[in-house]
Image (spheres, rainbow, N blue to C red):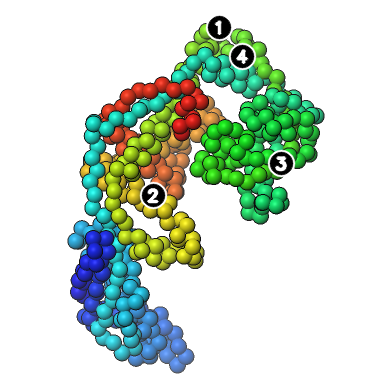
Amino acid sequence: MNITQENVDELNALLRVKVIAEDYLPKVENALKVHQKKASLPGFRPGKVPSGIIKKMYGKSALIDAINNLLNDSLHNYIHDNNIEVLGNPLPKMDSGIHIDWDNQKEFEFLYEMGIAPKFNVELSAKEKFDYKTIKIDEVLINKYITDISKRYGKVENAAISVDGDMLIGDLVELDAAGEILPGGIFKKSSLFIERVKDEATKKTLIGVSKGDKVIIDAQKLADKPVDIATIIGVDKDAAEKLTSKFQFTVQNINRLAGSEINQLLFDKIYGEGVVTNEEEFKDKIKGELTGMFINDSERKLYNDIVDHLMNTINFNLPTEFLKRWIVAVNEKPVTPDQIEAEFEGYSKGLKWSLIENKIIKENGIKVTNEEIINATKQLVLEQFAKFDPSPMAEEPLNATVQKVLTNKEESKKIYEKLYGEKVMNLFKSKFTLENKELSYDEFFDQV
């Protein structure tokens, strides 16, 4: 077996593989022996079919399987041994002009295309400054939260006709341009708080409705912020920003929330008897909760700002045409050229960040240990368990649940990536200069 590399340019190369009989014959002969042991044909005892008949029956398929396995192993070893950073996997070159005659050839030649990862540098310097944006926990926000809590712990009454302040529960169904239900469109059981709808015309359509009524709503007018629209409609923020459809909302129920009084009974109900004894302590408790609640938003905002900065300042090209062919080759379902063109920009952005992040991880020696994976999974399981049962979880069922979670490839991958993400974020904080910037709730989420 001989493999030679022919560089087309910095991002593309050809691998020419030459295979001779000595490379594949032992594998073919072993495969034929296995077939012979299993063969059962009329006129012959099991396992005693002559080798000539076995070769005629299985020789060609055994040859193809042996060479394919040999090619896969050899290409993998060649890339590993030569420390080549590839994108995707080598693909057989379709227009190579090489013809294979499996019946008569003894020596074979194969030509593969290979996409090579670009060379680039990542500099994480204290000269780069980023705002660490936090939400100002002011009196207005605290009072709003108190109002929400009082309603949450107050009485819920069913109403016949909606008024401002009610919560409508119903089905949101996406419509097409003609106002008909869109097949395969968005469908979500959702709840709408009338007082939170900022658009007055939209709010007016939601007041005075009864159970069973249908209201046509412009999704963009349900809230000011894409993140809020996303929550109502049940899509991500990016999809919410681009959403232009109208929706039919069918009212299933009208809930009228009568807020609970702000008194000791409410304090004890929320925090336990005697933990909070007056309104001032109640507000301090809420302030701490809000501060903790918004930490993740601040961290996510900083991370996104840093990612955007690195993506915009680190420039390199990708082997675009190779990657498009590779996506088509590995996709389980047929992909059209139009689909590739429409989705490739998003794919290439994801790949670019993956390359940058992997380089950061490699150059800074970031590792996630098995012990860290287990501990993080334990914490996740305990948090989930606590939602249903406040009592401590015994060690044996905890360990069994952890093992079950980690045998799920998707779940273990999420935990693995989360831990790497946290370590990369900690590295960013140690390398870049951060300046605290406090914003109001509305200012903060207008920038998310």
Which callout, 3 or 1, points at the residue further toward the start of the chain? 3
Q: Which residue is mark 3?
A: 216
Say which amino acid is labelled 1.
Asn
Which callout, 2 or 1, points at the residue further toward the start of the chain? 1
What's the CA distance linking mark 2 and mark 3? 36 Å
What's the CA distance linking mark 3 and mark 1? 45 Å
The residue lying toward the viewer, choosing from 292 and 74, is 292
Quadrant in the rendering for residue 57? bottom left
Q: Nearer the viewer's eye, disc 4 or disc 3?
A: 3
Disc 4 on helix, strand or loop? helix
What's the CA distance linking mark 2 and mark 1? 51 Å
Left or right of 336 in this view: 167: right
Q: Which residue is mark 1?
A: 278
Say which amino acid is labelled 2.
Gly
Q: Position of residue 140 (x, y in %)?
A: 54, 16
Which callout, 4 or 3, points at the residue further toward the start of the chain? 3
The residue lying toward the viewer, choosing from 346 and 401, is 346
The answer to whether the residue labelled 2 contacts the one labelled 1, judged by CB atoms less than 8 Å apart, is no
Disc 1 on helix, strand or loop? loop
Q: Is residue 231 visible?
A: no
Say which amino acid is labelled 4.
Leu
Q: Which residue is mark 2?
A: 350
